[in-house]
């Protein structure tokens, strides 16, 4: 497949000798960038942007750009005494005329020959003062119709020249530039994370595009950032989690687009970016792009803890908030499969406070087997957020070990113990010394009394062989 080139003619060696003595301007750093192709099987339209820097010296008057199909290029002579006219431009695909006297502007007429009609409608021109007498001029949305299909675009050649004379019939050529290849932008990646809060789930949009009409094979991989920061910034690394790999054909007419795509993101976890890694045998290097996570999760409360404990014939739920801002209430929800939830009841929230708050709810008729619970936190303005899901087992053999009241009263510790022997109960002070005690039982409820007088303070009640069940007991 052919590559499209665009050439801006400058002073070649021979012309440079002829023009340099009279040169009153300089053209620098011309670039021609392909923005895209469109068209049919018969004709193809190339959209290009042309930029160049011109030294106006004492003020230029006019600058002209001509574009040809390479096969039709007539090699016009840029003589100091003669500019290209209609015969020289008969096979040109397009001509652009610019006034560079003062602020640059597009012209609808070609000064050297009124039979030549330049491109004008739809073009945009901008200029940037670079200091001194140098100005950067950019012409965008240049639409060039090229005979032939877009699948096999021909090469283009372009000349650019400038004069400081008035636009009479034969203005002198004061400077000219040549042989600038068309720049075809490589693959460009853009993306966005859609927060979709508070309902969720978070999703992402992804776009991988190129202006190259030639189809190439590429592979893109998506990674969820591991949350580790380097210099307070996320960095792509080996611990990032790969969650998608896709190989696809990419060209100007075959972009890669994904919208509202879901990805593995746990509710209320720390926000993490998505890394896009694009590779391909024809790419000069791997392209790595970060889809930045700018989601800001605003909850009516800051939930510090949410847990559930199996009692004798019920499950006790408790949660702690460290801050509330306009919170209204908590809905307690239960599920048998962690998918479909039903509402068990409602607990009123404190409202607005920065003081730690403790809440509780008793499920008196838990399901047999696993019980899954979550909280829906509702703000005064109606906004909602959900907690993470917790599970509490309620099997026939499930062990239940839970304090009934803390601080204790009358130096008696009451607790529930189910499916475990009371001989495995232990009481220690904070120095690890064992405390003697006696136990009485009523059903699955036990009452423990220390065997001798003990001082006030914190003591640890635990179930032997179950270190995770340690309880702190305050004995007054």
Image (cartoon, rainbow, N blue to C red):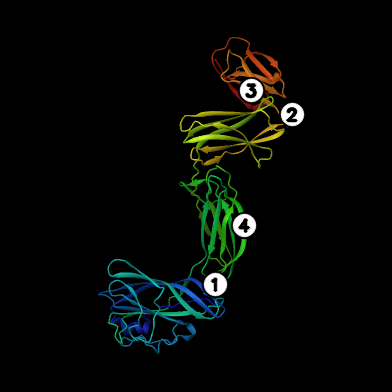
Q: Residue at x 48, y 82 (%)?
A: 69
Mark 3 to mark 2: distance in Å?
19 Å
Marks 3 and 1: in contact by CB < 8 Å? Answer: no
Residue at label 2?
397
Farthest residue, direction right: 396
Mark 1 to mark 3: distance in Å?
72 Å
From the viewer's perspective, is the residue at label 2 or at label 1 nearer? 2
Percent coordinates x, y for residue 105 in the rendering: 33, 73
Whichever of callouts 2 and 1 sits on the residue coming sooner in the sequence is 1
Residue at label 1?
213
Rendered image quadrant of residue 152:
bottom right
Residue 9 visible in the current orientation: no
Mark 2 to mark 4: distance in Å?
45 Å
From the viewer's perspective, is the residue at label 3 or at label 2 nearer? 2
Q: Residues within 10 Å of mark 4 (few under 14, many from 20)?
A: few
Per the image, label 2 sits on a secondary structure element best described as: loop
Mark 2 to mark 1: distance in Å?
68 Å
Marks 4 and 3: in contact by CB < 8 Å? Answer: no
Q: Which mark is residue 462?
A: 3
């Amino acid at each position: 497949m052919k590559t499209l080139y665009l050439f801006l003619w400058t002073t070649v060696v021979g012309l440079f000798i002829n023009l340099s003595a009279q040169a009153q301007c300089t053209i620098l750093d011309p670039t021609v960038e392909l923005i895209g192709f469109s068209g049919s099987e018969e004709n193809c339209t190339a959209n290009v942007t042309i930029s160049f820097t011109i030294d106006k010296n004492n003020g230029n008057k006019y600058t002209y750009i001509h574009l040809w199909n390479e096969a039709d290029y007539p090699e016009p002579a840029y003589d100091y005494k003669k500019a290209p006219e209609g015969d020289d431009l008969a096979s040109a695909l397009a001509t652009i005329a610019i006034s560079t006297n003062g602020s640059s502007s597009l012209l609808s007429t070609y000064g050297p020959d009124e039979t030549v009609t330049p491109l004008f409608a739809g073009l945009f021109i901008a200029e940037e003062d670079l200091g001194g007498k140098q100005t950067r001029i950019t012409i965008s949305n240049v639409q060039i119709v090229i005979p032939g299909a877009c699948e096999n675009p021909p090469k283009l050649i372009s000349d650019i020249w400038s004069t400081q004379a008035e636009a009479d019939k034969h203005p002198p050529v004061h400077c000219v530039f040549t042989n600038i290849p068309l720049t075809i932008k490589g693959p460009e990646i853009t993306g966005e994370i859609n927060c979709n809060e508070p309902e969720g789930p978070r999703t992402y949009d992804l776009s991988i595009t190129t202006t190259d009409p030639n189809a190439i094979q590429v592979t893109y991989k998506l990674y969820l950032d591991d949350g580790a920061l380097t210099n307070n910034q996320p960095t792509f690394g080996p611990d990032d989690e790969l969650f998608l790999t896709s190989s696809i054909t990419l060209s100007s007419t075959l972009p890669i687009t994904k919208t509202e795509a879901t990805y593995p993101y746990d509710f209320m976890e720390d926000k993490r970016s998505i890394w896009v890694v694009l590779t391909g045998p024809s790419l000069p290097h791997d392209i790595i792009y970060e889809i930045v996570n700018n989601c800001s999760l605003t909850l009516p409360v800051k939930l510090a803890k949410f847990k559930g404990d199996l009692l004798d014939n019920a499950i006790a739920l408790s949660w702690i908030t460290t801050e509330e801002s306009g919170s209204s209430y908590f809905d307690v929800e239960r599920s048998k499969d962690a998918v479909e939830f039903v509402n068990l009841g409602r607990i009123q929230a404190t409202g607005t406070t920065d003081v730690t708050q403790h809440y509780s709810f008793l499920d008196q008729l838990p399901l047999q087997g696993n019980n899954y619970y979550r909280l829906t936190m509702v703000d005064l303005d109606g906004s909602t957020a959900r907690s993470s899901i917790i599970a509490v087992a309620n099997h026939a053999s499930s062990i239940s070990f839970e304090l009934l009241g803390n601080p204790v009263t009358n130096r008696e510790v009451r607790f529930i113990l189910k499916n475990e022997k009371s001989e495995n109960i232990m009481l220690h002070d904070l120095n690890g010394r064992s405390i003697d005690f006696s136990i009485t039982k009523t059903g699955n409820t036990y009452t423990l009394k220390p065997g001798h007088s003990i001082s006030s303070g914190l003591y640890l009640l635990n179930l032997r062989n179950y270190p995770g069940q340690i309880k702190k007991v305050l004995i007054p």
